Image: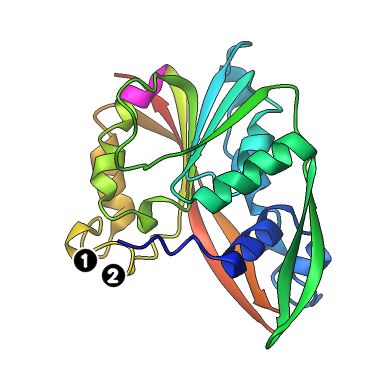
Amino acid sequence: MNNPYEDDKLLGEYLLFHYGPDIDVMPWDFGPQNGLQFPRRTIEELVDHAKLPEDSCALDVGCAVGGSSFELSKICQRVLGIDYSKSFIDAANSLKNRGSMAYRFPVEGGHYADGVAQIDPGPGEVEFEVGDACDLPQNIGSFDLVHAANLICRLPDPLLFLDRLPGLVKEGGQLLLATPFTWLEEFTPSKNWLGSGDSEQKLKELLSPNFILEERKDLPFVIREHRRKFQFSVSLGTRWLRVH
């Protein structure tokens, strides 16, 4: 199956989404400003700092171009970011090594504007790897914090990832999930969609044997397609405590 995320246009779109100035992502003051800075907000608004050990390690699954991974490096000593897209991981590594990266984003038709992605990492060590959330290495280890934003409804078989979570999150550790449950056949066969119209309830059923839900909040986000067209979605943000 071809990976739809290996595309230069989409790479620029995600670099803008993760690192672009607010005015470039949403240039209209009457637009949904509450949807900006989503990769940062999934960390800031969901993590429980009091439960993180001093030498904490984090796994960011579906990290895309790394915005949330660099944000995690501000609160964790070690961060591993994994994404299925090689172009996304190459961009994240380039930002890690150079601190900035030029990109282009669409204005209208075939016209593009130039942008520069810049990172503001924390003191923690960050590594990036290409990987499949449905087939993570058995020796990947366990983590104090696992973060997966807008990932579940882009997997061909979400259960393969969800079944791995008890082994990925240390007992007493945190699982941060964000998903708009945007089920599309091009990513996930309908037979693998969670629930039958109530994905949130199905997610609770699947996680409840090993996790306790501690936080639930709606997290809006905006992705710019061009200066007059945007994707506005609302991700369900949750924090789970690993108990068994």
Q: Is residue 75 magenta?
A: no
Provide residue 137's location: percent of width, then percent of height. Answer: 33, 29
* Residue shown at the point (59%, 29%) measured from the top left: 127
Provide residue 14's location: percent of width, then percent of height. Answer: 62, 59
Secondary structure under badge 1?
helix
Residue position marked by numbered label 2 in the rendering: 185
Secondary structure under badge 2?
loop
Residue position marked by numbered label 1 in the rendering: 190
Residue 38 vs 10, above or below: the answer is above
Q: Quadrant of the C terminus?
A: top left
Q: CA distance from mark 2 to mark 1?
A: 6 Å
Residue 65 vs 243, above or below: the answer is below
Q: Quadrant of the N terminus?
A: bottom left
Q: Is residue 224 visible?
A: yes
Towards the viewer: 124 or 131: 131
Name the amino acid type tagged 1: Ser
Classified by dominant secondary structure, the portion drawn in magenta counts as strand
Q: For this view, does 114 lie left or right of residue 82?
A: right
Q: Which range is magenta?
A: 167-171
Q: For this view, does 176 lie left or right of residue 134?
A: right
